[in-house]
Image: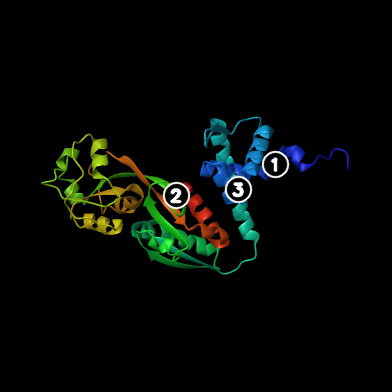
Amino acid sequence: MQAGFRPAAAMHDLPPLHTLPAFEAAARLGSFLAAAEALHLTPSAVSHRIRLLEEHLGQSLFERRHRAIALTAAGRRYLAVVRDTLLRLDEASAELRAPEKTRLRISAAPALGSKWLVSRVAAWQQQHPETEFSLGTATSLAPLLAGEADIGLRYGEEEWPGLLAWKLFEERVFPVCSPALAAQLHTPADLDLGHVRLLRHPLLSWQRWFAAAGVKHAEPKEGPLYEDALLMLEAAVAGHGVALMAETLAAPYLAEGRLSRPFAADCPDRSFYVVAPPAVQEKRGAMDFIRWLVRSAKAA
């Protein structure tokens, strides 16, 4: 061995690399058992790898509780670096693999599909012309559960029974309406159910926003009900009433001046997710696209 030569591992003091996927999976799934199932390992193997990583770092990464685990403060900081590193390795590896035709069937909620997804599909396809997309719209999970779609984009809570889920971004919601109608409104109390038509969506709670705005109104039981947020946005543009809307979907309309925010108050709500059947893990092209989509959402 030449004088002065030091192995790369010694120079960088890297942790055992096989411990990192175990750590990321346990942190993401909140369970050593779930991580073991996802990685096709035994729970004891996952536990051993995480213990080995903690010994290398000299830090506890998890708090072990009865039938549960939680990240320590050090674990949360380390997870951000590990997750980004693994995503970058996945993308670099995907670029080096021999190209092959990949067909992805995507089922998106209509508003998110037209206002957010389509431009990202175009950006992906510029770099990956071998990918063939089939895009459809739906609000239910039926296309995914029936195997008619590989990937879905939906708005909802954290639990997606029977599906895997990756959070794209959390949402805040607020009322929007046409500029002409906004000029007539001065305070949230002006949204009197007898004088201003409230447009409703089954996943958006007017009562939650009322509470955030300091107004004592119950959830409206009357008024137009839209299952498609895109239709509700267009109804608001047409002056049909005031719509409660997620920021990501309202932003293009606000930027164009087609809609206005009559009040500053907003409140947190559900989140947009990429959801997919567990079988998607066997489809390399689909997983590459999902990881890229998540990174794209976080960079926006």
Q: Amino acid at mark 1?
A: Pro
Q: CA distance from mark 1 to mark 3?
A: 14 Å
In the image, is 286 to the left or to the right of 153? right
Q: Amino acid at mark 3?
A: Leu
Image x and y of residue 144, in percent: 43, 61
Residue at 66%, 37% in the rendered image: 53
Q: Is residue 71 above or below residue 206?
A: above
Q: Is residue 300 visible?
A: no
How many neighbours does mark 3 have within 10 angstroms: few (below 14), some (14-19), or many (20 or more)? some
Q: What kind of element bears circle 1?
A: loop
Residue under circle 3?
A: 86
Residue at 75%, 38% in the rendered image: 11
Residue at 72%, 37% in the rendered image: 13
Q: Amino acid at mark 2?
A: Leu
Q: Mark 1 or mark 3, which is nearer to you?
A: 1
Label pair 2/1, CB-CB below 8 angstroms? no
How many neighbours does mark 1 have within 10 angstroms: few (below 14), some (14-19), or many (20 or more)? few
Q: Which mark is residue 32?
A: none
Residue under circle 1?
A: 16
N-term mark: 1 or 3: 1
How many neighbours does mark 2 have within 10 angstroms: few (below 14), some (14-19), or many (20 or more)? many
Residue at 29%, 56% in the rendered image: 229
Q: Mark 2 or mark 1, which is nearer to you?
A: 1
Q: Is residue 60 above or below residue 110?
A: above
Residue under circle 2?
A: 168
Q: CA distance from mark 2 to mark 1?
A: 30 Å
N-term mark: 2 or 1: 1
Q: Is residue 203 visible?
A: yes
Of the pair 179 and 47, the residue shown nearer to us? 47
Image x and y of residue 59, in percent: 62, 30
